[in-house]
Image (spheres, rainbow, N blue to C red):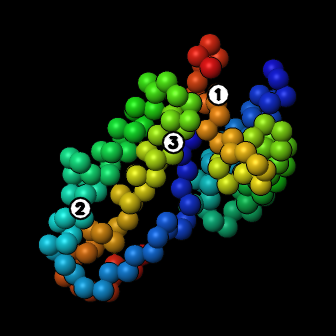
Amino acid sequence: MWTYSKKLQYPVKIKNPNPAAAKIIMTQLGGPDGELAASMRYLHQRYSCPYGEVTGILTDIGTEEWVPSTYPSFEQLSLIKPGIGLA
Amino acid sequence: MSEREMLLKRVQVCDFALMDAALFLDTHPENQMALDFYKKHLEMRKATVDAYTSKYGPLVHTDYDGGPYWNWVEGPWPWQHQEEA
């Protein structure tokens, strides 16, 4: 079962809003070859994988790839007001 | 039911009770009865997880016992049917 912790994997602090960078990062997260899609592929492939240790690592990577999609700071990167992207 | 299954079931029961109590406590943070309920099941869970992991391996990878072998990816997976394992 999946659970979450009340801590970040890596701290993010946005100093300046940057819509161009935000566009790239949001695509990297949610786009067709983004981390969210990758995590879903890993988690589905694990079920048909014939090797135990690979099944294990697919489960772990599929879980980890999903984590950055929980970072609201990346969305705030494109907002006007600096300083609110404190993670 | 094997001892392993029995201990795992007890962890599941505790986790369910804790999750349910947590949802209630989210909106009733000062309810003493709910806090006592949570505490009781938390203690039961800790003891059961210790008993389980010392004998049957990790439930989360940070349950690693410090030994010479990484047994995290060993099956059966909890959602795997017995006949597939």
Distance from the alpha carbon under mark 3 to that under mark 2: 25 Å
Inter-mark Cα distance, 1 to 3: 15 Å
Q: Residue shown at 21%/70% (left/top)?
A: A22
Q: Secondary structure at mark 2?
A: helix
Residue that extends furthest to the top in the rendered view of this protein: B83
Check if mark 1 and mark 3 are on a common chain: no
Question: Are the residues under badges 1 and 2 in a single subunit?
Answer: no
- Which residue in the structure is indicated by mark 1? B76
Q: Quadrant of residue A39?
A: top left
Q: Residue at x 77, y 54 (%)?
A: B66
Q: Is residue A66 visible?
A: yes
Given residues A59 and B44, the one toward you in this image is: A59
Question: Could you say which quadrant of the image residue B57 lies in?
Answer: top right
In the rendered image, the quadrant that contains the N terminus of chain B is top right
With A57 as the anchor, is B46 left or right in this view?
A: right
Q: Chain of mark 3?
A: A
Residue B42 drawn at (x, y percent) = 76, 53
**Disc 2 sits on a residue from what chain?**
A
Q: Are marks 3 and 2 in contact (CB under 8 Å)?
A: no
Foreground of the two, A48 or A53: A53
User: Which label belongs to residue A26?
Assistant: 2
Instruction: Name the amino acid type tagged 3.
Output: Ile
